[in-house]
Amino acid sequence: RYWGNFGEYAMTDYNDLEDKFMFNLTEDIFLTMEDAGVTKEKASEHLGCYMWEFEDFISGEYYMSIEEILKLCHLCGAEIDVVITRNGKNVREELGYENTSGH
């Protein structure tokens, strides 16, 4: 049973939700790297990791830390903006809060 982007999950299904979230995040980062002309070699050097470690991230075998994700986005000239939705609507907007991320 699905609703929203990730669906409705029982308590035991959070691992599946995490996997889907990380897959989508990884895919977005890889597309951003391609668009910015950042190679896997340059990214792994910037993160201070071995090439095989970075390839494990891209393949989904390894999850990057928030710090690593932010460093990689910075390298690509990109930013992350988190949006939490409930019933298909942006929670922050629904509650009348302004965007505090500066965008």
Image (tube, helix red, strand yellow):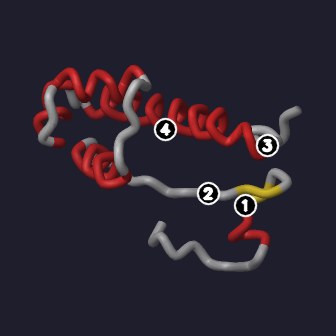
Q: What's the CA distance linking mark 4 and mark 1?
A: 19 Å
Most extreme residue toward the right is 1
Amino acid type at circle 1 is Asn
Q: Residue at x 81, y 51 (%)?
A: 88
Relative image position of residue 11 (x, y in whole percent): 76, 46
Residue linked to disc 1: 90
Q: What's the CA distance linking mark 2 and mark 1?
A: 7 Å
82 vs 7, nearest the viewer: 7
Q: What's the CA distance linking mark 1 and mark 3?
A: 11 Å
Amino acid type at circle 3 is Gly
Q: Residue at x 18, y 42 (%)?
A: 47
Q: Is residue 64 left or right of residue 28?
A: left
- The vertical placement of 37 against 75, above or below, is above
Residue linked to disc 4: 25
Give whichever of discs 3 and 2 has the lower sequence position. 3
Amino acid type at circle 2 is Val
Amino acid type at circle 4 is Leu
**Mark 1 secondary-structure assignment:** strand
Q: Residues within 10 Å of mark 4 (few under 14, many from 20)?
A: few
Relative image position of residue 8 (x, y in whole percent): 82, 42
Toward which corner of the image does residue 42 lie, by quadrant?
Answer: top left
Give whichever of discs 4 and 2 has the lower sequence position. 4
**Mark 4 secondary-structure assignment:** helix
* Rendered image: mark on residue 83: 2
Circle 4/circle 2 CB separation < 8 Å: no
Circle 2/circle 1 CB separation < 8 Å: yes
